[in-house]
Amino acid sequence: MSHIKIIDTGEQELLISFEKIINKQINFKVQFLAKLVEQHLSKNIIEVVPTYCSLLIYFNPLIISRHNLKTQITQLIDVVEKNNITHRKARVLSIPVCYSKIYGPDLSSLAQYHGLSEKEVISIHTSTPYLIYMLGFTPGYAYLGGLSEKIATPRLKNPRTKVPVGSVGIGGKQTCFYTIECPGGFHLIGRTPISAFNFDLPQPFLFSAGDYLQFQEISQGEYQAIAADIHAGSYQPTVIEIDDDIAQ
């Protein structure tokens, strides 16, 4: 446990800091510990917030002392460290994207930057599932890992003040889709009609950290049809389950 630290960050907060490395193995340990804390300490905590390589825990000091909480968390960390899990079941959600000039105003310039055709950029972008390391920034916004170096692109020098909801972008070594209209500095290459969250549902978020997103190219007509189905409440995203190699 020498590389895992429990840090006091506030009157109601503890930060569990793992190795400062962004990879699947470390992130799995973060997610595993988050689940254990929620399962065993739910009466004593307010919220658990997993990130790339750390876990922030909000607790009520009137219910449990910091000392007692640290003792219990240390025991759970020991469980995480001793686990020999090498594979897990993971969900892969298909995210339909219309890669057109209307929805992806930066697709052409990004392709030119890399000396690729637009079709090649789309092919690379849709060729692999992306691991969701964490959610944050805006509701349901997924921090994704796995973008090919072939299309990794520096962020815009002058970010947009408004990015339309559903816009799919690339910035640095990350790709994403914007879950609300907001400022953003990613190059926009397409748009999805999918909504990442609906607070009227018992489970408001479409996906969770540990899931994968696989972008799928659709036409503008298919985009409109899916948008209509979503508005009518009849659309269900395609989800498959895979055997995920944690050590890979």
Image (cartoon, rainbow, N blue to C red):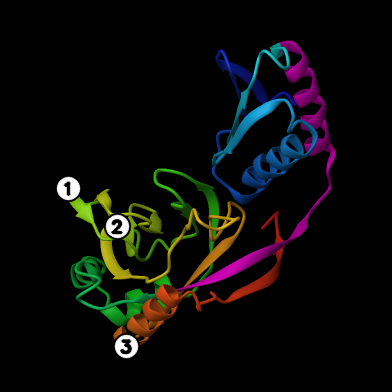
Q: Position of residue 130 (x, y in %)?
A: 52, 62
Q: Nearer the viewer, residue 81 or 228?
A: 228
Relative to 174, is 123 above or below? Answer: below
In the picture, the disc for residue 153 is 2
Disc 1 residue crowd, few under 14, some 14–19, many 20+, Cα 10 Å: few
- Asked if residue 18 shows in the view, the reply is no
Task: Name which residue lies at 35% across and 81% down.
Answer: 223
**Callout 1 secondary element:** loop
Reading the image, the residue beneath label 3 is: 221
Q: What whole-number distance in Å separates the C-alpha atoms at marks 3 and 2? A: 29 Å
In the picture, the disc for residue 247 is none
Q: Nearer the viewer, residue 232 or 107?
A: 232
Q: Is the residue under label 2 in contact with that under label 1 (CB below 8 Å)?
A: no
* Residue 76 on the magenta segment: yes
Amino acid tagged 1: Lys
From the image, which quarter does the C terminus lie in? bottom right
Relative to 92, is 74 above or below? Answer: above
Task: Name which residue lies at 70% across and 54% down.
Answer: 247
Reading the image, the residue beneath label 1 is: 157
Task: Name which residue lies at 48% across and 55% down.
Answer: 144
Q: Name the mark nearer the viewer: 1 or 2.
A: 1
Q: What whole-number distance in Å separates the C-alpha atoms at marks 1 and 2? A: 12 Å
Classify residue 125 by image quadrant.
Answer: bottom left
Amino acid tagged 3: Gly
Is 167 on the left or on the right of 175, as rendered?
Answer: left
Q: Position of residue 101 (x, y in %)?
A: 20, 76
Sequence order check, earlier mark of 3 and 1? 1
Task: Name which residue lies at 33% across and 52% down.
Answer: 172
**Callout 3 secondary element:** helix
Q: Position of residue 241 (x, y in %)?
A: 69, 71
**Callout 2 secondary element:** loop
| The residue stretch that appears in magenta | 67-95
